[in-house]
Amino acid sequence: MVIVAFSAVLRLALGVIDSLFYRPTPEPVVSEEPVYVDPVYTHDYSFDTYEVIDQYLRYRSDTYTSQTGLDLSSHQGEINWQKVKDTGIDFVVIRVGYRGYETGLINEDQRFREYIQAAENYGFNVGVYFFSQAVNTEEAAEEAEYVLSMIKDYRISMPIAYDMEQASDHDRIKDLTKEERTQAALAFAKTIKEAGYTPIVYGSSSWLENEISMEDIQDTCGFWVASYTKKKLPMMHQYEIWQYSNKGRVPGISVDVDLNIYMKKN
């Protein structure tokens, strides 16, 4: 019993360490060279149709209607959900948890349960994401199963996102090959899809186009691209969500928050 208790305390301590050193999404790097995209998978969005109203990017055409959303983690702290709702935000994507980039332990986001229950209560469309540091397909599938176990009692109407980023020069994924990263993303997406949910892979345009093979996973999942410009997104591949700012200031949230636009077919 003493050993079990010590193990639990050690696991908690290591999780706290990972949380303390967790780094938010860095400024996405823009690809300098255009990447060829099969016309079948090229998006048909017109950037002339995007418009900024207040700080929010909007899009409306005969084909698409946009929704405005936020992605949230414990870094956002205490939230006044009524104020957020009053701004007209349509959806939130909440971090379920993360795998420690040094310890490799899976940790629950400290505010996941609080956030997802509040989001449901206030009528937001809800999606979730997991910050991955999987070094193989087994770990990626384990992360997906963890997500599924955490969301089983909630209404998920938005995609479930796989977010793999290199957080430091010492993290677990720094030496993975492009093929290994691709297969990990695919393992996560397949597990989510087989459970009846919609998987999506998150990353900067540069990461999506260069660090994984979008061609190998595009029939299994969609893409959520981070590019902090409201002028034109430097990626021609089809995407469903565009994270266009990490400096949003939203009533009800006291710190910066990521702003997203979700492209929904009419």
Image (cartoon, helix red, strand yellow):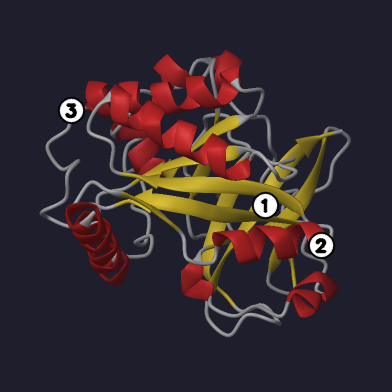
Q: Residue at x 65, y 78 (%)?
A: 79
Of residues 183 and 194, which is closer to you in this image? Answer: 194
Q: Position of residue 140 (x, y in %)?
A: 35, 31
- What amino acid is found at the position of numbered circle 1 in the picture? Ile
Crowding around mark 3 (Cα neighbors within 10 Å: few <14, some 14 to 19, many 20+) is: few
Distance from disc 3 to disc 2, alpha carbons, whole Å, reads 42 Å
Q: State the image quarter where residue 160 is shown.
A: top right
Q: Residue at x 69, y 41 (%)?
A: 158
Residue 111 seen in render: yes
Q: Position of residue 49 (x, y in %)?
A: 75, 48
Left or right: where 158 falls relative to 225: right
Of residues 71 and 263, which is closer to you in this image? Answer: 71
Cβ atoms under marks 1 and 2 closer than 8 Å:
no
Of residues 58 and 185, which is closer to you in this image? Answer: 185
Cβ atoms under marks 3 and 2 closer than 8 Å:
no
Disc 3: which residue: 177
